[in-house]
Image (cartoon, rainbow, N blue to C red):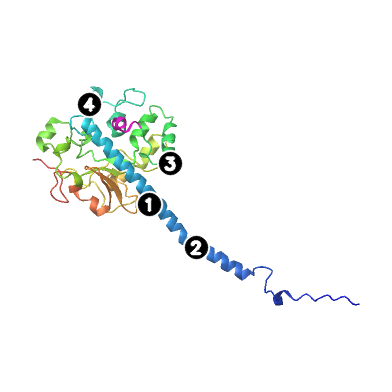
Amino acid sequence: MRSFHPRKQPLAHRRDGVRGGFTLIELLVVIAVIAVLIGIMLPALSGARGAARQIQEMVAGQQLMIAYTSYADAHRGYVLPGYPSRNMINQGRITAYDRSGEAIGFPTASRYPWRLAPYMNYNFAGMYHRDASLEEMARTNLPGIDEKYVISLFPLYGLNSQYIGGNERFLAFNSTTERVFGRFYVRRLDEVRRPSGLLTFATARADRETFASVGLSREFPGHFDVWAPRFSESAGEQWASTYDPRTPTPRENSGFVDLRHRGKALTAMFDGHVRALGWEELRDMRLWSDQAAKPDWALGPR
């Protein structure tokens, strides 16, 4: 008897309809679909990361304000001096200590982080761009520059020291200038008339040359100070007309204020809440000075 061997059908005509693989066109279509999906997903993932960073920084701002208020409670209602003079530090009128209890001198002690640190249990986590940034600060090896000095420069938030607490570089702590201009900066908690509308801290960014001056090879958000759009009538505008997120000199562009959250800066207000504000909102001087009665107000002789 002859054995029966069914003939193999050509690949294109198999009864089960199964094909041996993708054609080149089909592969290109699949790759194109994957590319489209990635293009759709990446902005969403980036947005999610940005939202997470914003939430983290908002929480950091709230913690900062708790420490700021705790300082005032411990000092009979007097707020933290914004930027004390060398004499105030050297004479012991303003003091700062590191984690081991060692006294910190000028200018490191004039910046707010180490003076506020005890009211945060010296826990700097969350107050700087990343923990890795703190590690990098500790590795600086330039003569005369130590970790404490670098840490004092780059907290996420800068203090509105011109109008809250006083800044010796802006006419504060000087009896002569204060006779001319009066007490133009907040000294006590109970002096503020509009706590919910007074900007105390804002997200900040330092000038590029500051990073180079302390031996840091890369830049990251942070600066201890923020300056208002206007200070004195004679000085005029301190900010540029438009915001430049890539400028190497944020001091000249936006008074160190960093609008890094979708074109907005996070601001910690005097009553403790944190909110995001855009460029035009931030240019309103009523946010910066408790004495300001109009958006373009500036300090002048009384």
The amino acid at mark 2 is Leu
Give above or below for 6 relative to 105: below
Q: CA distance from mark 3 to mark 4?
A: 33 Å
Q: Quadrant of the N terminus?
A: bottom right
Q: Earlier in the sequence, mark 2 or mark 4?
A: 2
Q: CA distance from mark 2 to mark 1?
A: 21 Å
Q: CA distance from mark 2 to mark 4?
A: 60 Å
- Residue indicated by mark 1: 51
Looking at the image, residue 215 sits to the left or right of residue 81; the answer is: right
Q: Secondary structure at mark 1?
A: helix
Task: Name the mark nearer the viewer: 3 or 2.
Answer: 2
Percent of width and height locating residue 58: 32, 45
- Mark 2, Cα crowd under 10 Å, few <14 / some 14-19 / many 20+, is few
- Residue farthest along the left direction in this orientation: 302
The amino acid at mark 4 is Met
Q: Secondary structure at mark 4?
A: helix
**Res 184 label:** none
Q: CA distance from mark 1 to mark 4?
A: 41 Å
Q: CA distance from mark 1 to mark 3?
A: 24 Å
- Residue indicated by mark 4: 88
Give above or below for 17 relative to 90: below
> What residue lies at 25% left-to-right and 23% top-to-bottom?
90
The amino acid at mark 1 is Ala
Specify the segment rendered in magenta: 115-122
- Residue indicated by mark 2: 37
Can residue 287 be spotted in the picture? Answer: yes
Task: Name the mark nearer the viewer: 1 or 3.
Answer: 1
Percent of width and height locating residue 63: 30, 39
Snapshot quadrant of residue 161? top left
Q: Are discs 3 and 4 less than 8 Å apart at CB?
A: no
Q: Are discs 1 and 4 less than 8 Å apart at CB?
A: no
Snapshot quadrant of residue 166? top left
